[in-house]
Amino acid sequence: MIEVLVSEKLVVRVPCAVIEHNGKVLAGQRSAALSFPLQWEFPGGKLEKGETDEQALFREIMEELNVAVQIIDKLPETSKDQGWREIVLVPFICKVNTTDFILTEHEQILWLDPEDLPSLDWTEADLNVIQNYYDYLTAKS
Ligand SMILES: Nc1nc2c([nH]c(=O)n2[C@H]2C[C@H](O)[C@@H](COP(=O)(O)OP(=O)(O)OP(=O)(O)O)O2)c(=O)[nH]1
């Protein structure tokens, strides 16, 4: 019998927004009804067919928060192997013109000082995003 290794994995690209406003950063709590229930994330979502990262980000934030984001910068992509699939988070530093959000998916949002981000229960993939955000802030200062 010859053993054959078949390697196939779904790669899911997820643009997300690190939204800064007045020195604070926005964290969103995932709905109890979704995967990673009640964990914290940066708003965003999976790329749809034919979209660029930026188009998907804009669409997702409009759907989830009902605001238009403006991209300021990009953080390194971060992958998380979930066994049957790999999540690739594509984080963008963003700003918004208004904070009058209409939440359509999140349980709640919080504005945090950057140093307080680790106090929340983030999805595992986001821990690298937060570290990369700190590196970004350090490089900027
Ligand atoms: N938007 C966003 N998604 C994240 C983050 N961290 C993280 O693991 N994810 C995961 C959760 C989801 O599995 C996927 C984003 O897909 P989605 O926002 O369309 O959510 P979903 O619950 O419908 O996705 P799924 O897990 O059911 O496939 O990426 C993050 O910071 N922001």
Image (cartoon, rainbow, N blue to C red):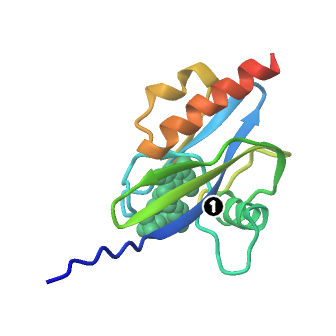
Q: Is residue 92 above or below residue 141?
A: below
Q: Is residue 128 left or right of residue 111?
A: left
Q: Quadrant of residue 93?
A: top right
Q: Residue at x 53, y 37 (%)?
A: 128
Cβ of mark 1 under 8 Å from ligand 1: the answer is no
- Farthest residue to the front: give it: 1
Q: Residue at x 64, y 25 (%)?
A: 134
Classify the position of the N terminus by image quarter.
bottom left
The image position of residue 94, as x and y in percent, is: 78, 44
- Farthest residue to the left: give it: 1
The image position of residue 123, as x and y in percent, is: 43, 45
- Farthest residue to the bottom: give it: 1
Amino acid type at mark 1: Glu
Classify the position of the C terminus by image quarter.
top right
Q: Does the image show residue 106?
A: no
Q: Residue at x 63, y 24 (%)?
A: 114
Label 1, residues with CA under 10 Å away: few <14, some 14-19, many ≥20: some
Q: Which residue is tagged 1?
A: 64
Q: Is residue 4 left or right of residue 134?
A: left
Q: Residue at x 34, y 76 (%)?
A: 6
The image position of residue 76, as x and y in percent, is: 67, 43
Question: Which structural element holds mark 1?
Answer: helix
